[in-house]
Image (spheres, rainbow, N blue to C red):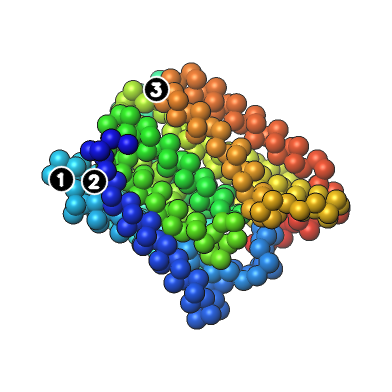
């Protein structure tokens, strides 16, 4: 690592340390708040844990992220501070806070409607677009790109959909121990590498701060989960990833918009495929079930353990998590090698879509029968 980067990366230690400290406090005070914050294993079809677990780990991620950014801002040299100010962090935070707070309310009350949560995520995207310059101005499709650049309202619409979509997509893939944290580390890691390659130091450090905060939370989330990220944490992570990838493509026109899609291909594919599957079965697109890729991996490992008695390394939950992560990492890691090559990135996106569908189909075949019905229930979440 070049010596000149060491002072810039020093604030990542506070981000990690504060996240670990807050997570530790939440875990060791669980008896005080578990009656409010507990996620119970019998509360829905997607629950694979065996005991009530606090689901307010998003507080640790938020605390770590803020600690790292505050330290970075005040310790940065004038040139870097100017780059950070150019991101308009105050307005980015203004877009995030209502979304994060709504997620915290949902994590405690578990009664916020999907419509309200989606509406607030759209508002977060609108604030980022209008006041922080987070704009989708290209999709890598010439006709649509021309419209986006000539019609500001169309650009706003696509930005809202991109931000809100990724916010909720990250929440959907938060289903196993360490899975959301692992996907976050891969996605933000790829964004940090590409940002560094294009001298976008502020975006690189924003991504690294998010990684450090997430890693601090993950200490208590994998392989045994003593703390869940919750909706608030997933919303924070989705918003952060959306902001960074949109700004990276906007500020560096040589980076293809297809790179943005390839980096977040797994959560996007999981979300769209799940909605299509539910509609095909006559259900509402947001109706919860346990037929996501990670849920199917868990059901497969559980069935194998019951039939053969074989022990699953790290356990069924964590074992299904790292297997899902191995598949989910393919698209962003490949995209990292060719962020400016639109054709290659299109093949990566299409290739991952094929890999995802084939993997899900193969996982469904041996377990989607009457004996496995409890693991794949469509009961209300």
**Spatial CA span between label 3 and label 1:** 30 Å
- The secondary element bearing badge 3 is classed as loop
Marks 2 and 3: in contact by CB < 8 Å?
A: no
One can see residue 121 in this view: no
Sequence-wise, the earlier of marks 3 and 1 is 1
Quadrant in the rendering for residue 120 = bottom left
Viewer-nearest of discs 3 and 1:
1
- Residue at mark 1 to residue at mark 2: CA–CA distance: 9 Å
Q: Quadrant of the C terminus?
A: bottom right
Kindly state the secondary structure of the residue where label 1 is placed.
Answer: loop
**Residue 172 versus residue 191 in the image, above or below:** below
> Which structural element holds mark 2?
helix
How many residues crowd around disc 1 within 10 Å: few (fewer than 14), some, or many (20 or more)?
A: few
Q: Residue furthest bottom?
A: 32
Which residue does the numbered mark 2 point to in the structure image? 7
Give coordinates of residue 78: x percent, y percent.
Answer: 13, 44
Above or below for 308 versus 157: below
Left or right of 63: which side holds 169?
right
Q: Are marks 1 and 2 in contact (CB under 8 Å)?
A: yes
Residue at 28% x, 52% y: name it: 11
Q: Where does the image place residue 286, in percent across and percent down from the top left?
A: 60, 52
The quarter of the displayed image where residue 242 is located: top left
Please name the residue that numbered disc 3 is placed on: 340
Q: Earlier in the sequence, mark 1 or mark 2?
A: 2
**What residue is rendered at 53% in x and 65% in y?**
227
| Left or right: where 46 falls relative to 171 | right
Q: State which mark lies toward you, 1 or 2.
A: 2
Asked where in the image residue 204 lies, by quadrant, the reply is top left
Q: Which residue is mark 1?
A: 77
Q: Residue furthest left?
A: 78
Q: Which mark is residue 107?
A: none
């Amino acid at each position: 690592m070049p010596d000149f980067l060491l002072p810039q990366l020093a604030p990542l230690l506070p981000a990690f340390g504060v996240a670990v400290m807050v997570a530790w406090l939440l875990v060791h005070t669980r008896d005080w708040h578990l009656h409010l914050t507990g996620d119970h294993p019998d509360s829905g079809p997607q629950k694979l844990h065996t005991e009530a677990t606090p689901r307010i780990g998003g507080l640790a991620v938020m605390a770590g992220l803020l600690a790292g950014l505050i330290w970075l801002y005040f310790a940065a040299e004038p040139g870097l501070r100017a780059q950070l100010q150019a991101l308009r962090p105050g307005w980015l935070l203004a877009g995030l806070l209502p979304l994060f707070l709504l997620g915290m309310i949902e994590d405690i009350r578990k009664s916020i409607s999907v419509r309200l949560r989606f509406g607030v995520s759209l508002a977060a995207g609108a604030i980022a677009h209008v006041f922080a310059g987070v704009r989708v101005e290209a999709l890598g499709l010439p006709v649509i790109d021309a419209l986006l650049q000539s019609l500001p309202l169309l650009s706003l619409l696509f930005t809202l959909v991109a931000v809100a979509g990724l916010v909720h997509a990250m929440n959907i893939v938060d289903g196993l121990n360490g899975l959301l944290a692992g996907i976050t580390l891969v996605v933000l890691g790829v964004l940090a590498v590409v940002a560094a390659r294009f001298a976008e130091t502020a975006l690189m450090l924003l991504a690294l701060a998010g990684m450090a905060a997430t890693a601090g939370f993950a200490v208590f989330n994998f392989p045994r989960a003593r703390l869940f990220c919750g909706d608030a944490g997933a919303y924070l992570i989705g918003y952060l990833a959306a902001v960074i990838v949109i700004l990276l493509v906007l500020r560096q026109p040589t980076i293809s918009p297809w790179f943005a899609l390839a980096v977040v291909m797994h959560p996007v594919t999981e979300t769209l495929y799940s909605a299509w599957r539910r509609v095909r079965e006559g259900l509402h697109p947001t109706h919860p079930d346990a037929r996501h890729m990670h849920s199917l991996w868990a059901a497969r490992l559980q069935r194998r353990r019951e039939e053969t008695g074989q022990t699953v390394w790290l356990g069924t939950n964590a074992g299904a998590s790292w297997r899902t992560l191995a598949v989910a990492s393919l698209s962003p890691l490949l995209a990292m090698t060719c962020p400016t090559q639109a054709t290659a990135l299109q093949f990566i996106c299409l290739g991952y879509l094929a890999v995802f569908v084939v993997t899900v189909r193969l996982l469904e075949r041996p377990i989607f029968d009457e004996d496995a019905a409890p693991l794949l229930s469509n009961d209300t979440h």
